[in-house]
Every structure is written in structure tokens, then in C-alpha cells.
Image (cartoon, rainbow, N blue to C red):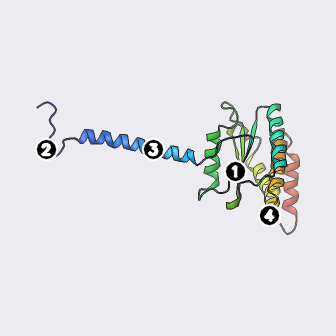
Amino acid sequence: MRGRWPAGQRGVGRNAFIGVLLSIFCLLLAFAALAADLPPLTGRVVDNAGIIDAGTRAALTQKLADFEKKGSDQIVVATIPTLGGEEIEPYANRLFRFWKLGQAKENNGVLLLVAPNDRKMRIEVGYGLEGTLTDLHTKLIIENDMVPAFRAGDFSGGISKAVDDMIMVLEGNPEELEARGKRNEQAPFN
């Protein structure tokens, strides 16, 4: 009688175990696939879309390195040709976490992500900096620096200006950015 299952129930436990193992395997494959479509972190400027000219790329890399040396905050610029149908917010969040930007305990990283073929851009801010580089600041940077430059075809200039303004805010000087935002808000034909 030991080990006997009622008729029709033989192998149910084994099949359930195999089902659980297959489910875990599928989840692991899904996570691996999600990570596989993320570019590797190769520096402070990862221009996979090829929209930043060499001079600007070098200047940005130096500027970001100098900023990082002054404190512990970290800014990385990334461009990808397309999001492949994914929304930019979850993609930027996954990339931010995959690259582990900023210090783990401080969560003080910032990712500037541009997908030119999708006409999307986002500034992903680590939780430790959200009180300094607020949603209002990132909105002003995107609307006042990046969008006008990108419309004029100047991706390098828009990204460079955005980095300048992020550094300015993170160094404790948000007033100029906020004043520019108010002036642009009041400008006719906006």
C-alpha cells in the first residue's frame, strides 16, 4: 500500500514538480531576454544611436567625470536608436537598475536616455536625488533644452545643454533653470 496513488492520480506530484521547474526556467529565460536587449555600460556617454558628435562626446565624458569627482553623484548619458515598441519609462528604469548607476546606499545616479527614432527622451533620477533634481526640473530640462535643439537637428547641443542644467541643479543652483522655465511659460506662441 505504501506509495500507492488512487487510480488516475499516479504521477501527479512528479508532474506538478516538473511544472514548477519549467515555470522557474521560463521566468529565468524571460529575465535574461530583458537584460540581453540592454546595452552594456561602456562609459559615461553610451551613444548607441550615433547622434552625438565626437567632440561633444569627449567634452561630455570629461564634464561628467569632473562632476563625479566633486561629489558622489553620477550622471550617464545613453542613446539608443529605438525602444523597440517599449515605453521609455520602464526601459529607462530597467537600464538604470541594470547599470547600477550611483552609489548603492545613496541611490544617487541619473540617466539621460534618448531614443531618436521614437522621438522619446527621459531623465531617470535615483531616489536619493529626487528631492534635488525634481520632476519639475527634469521636465524643464527636456522641454527647454532638449526638445528645441532636437527639433533643429542638434542632438549634441540639446544633450550637452541638458547635462549642464542637470549639473547646475545637482550642485544646488536650480534658480536659473526655474527662471528660464517661467520666462518660456510666459513667452507668446509657446
Q: Amino acid at mark 4?
A: Arg
Mark 3 and mark 1 in contact? Answer it, CB < 8 Å. no
Q: Which residue is mark 3?
A: 27
Who comes first in sequence, dot 3 or dot 4?
3
Q: Could you tell me which secondary element the residue under label 4 belongs to?
A: helix
In this image, 6 relative to 32: left or right? left
Q: Earlier in the sequence, mark 3 or mark 2?
A: 2
Q: Residue at horizontal 48%, vertical 47%?
A: 30
Q: Label 3 vs label 1: CA separation?
A: 28 Å
**Secondary element at image label 1:** loop
Residue shown at the point (37%, 43%) measured from the top left:
22
CA gap, disc 1 to disc 2?
60 Å
x, y percentage for residue 6? 14, 41
In front: mark 1 or mark 4?
Answer: 1
**Residue tagged 1:** 48
Tell me the crowding category of disc 3: few under 14, some 14 to 19, or many 20 or more residues within 10 angstroms, Cα based.
few
- Answer few, some or many: residues within 10 Å of disc 1's Cα (few below 14, many 20 plus, some between 14 and 19): some
Residue 106 versus residue 16 in the image, above or below: above
Q: Where 155 sits versus 11, above or below?
A: below
Q: Earlier in the sequence, mark 3 or mark 1?
A: 3
Q: Are marks 1 and 4 in contact (CB under 8 Å)?
A: no
- Amino acid type at image mark 2: Ala
- Which tag, 1 or 4, sits closer to the chain's start? 1
- Element under disc 3: helix
Q: Position of residue 56 (x, y in %)?
A: 83, 48
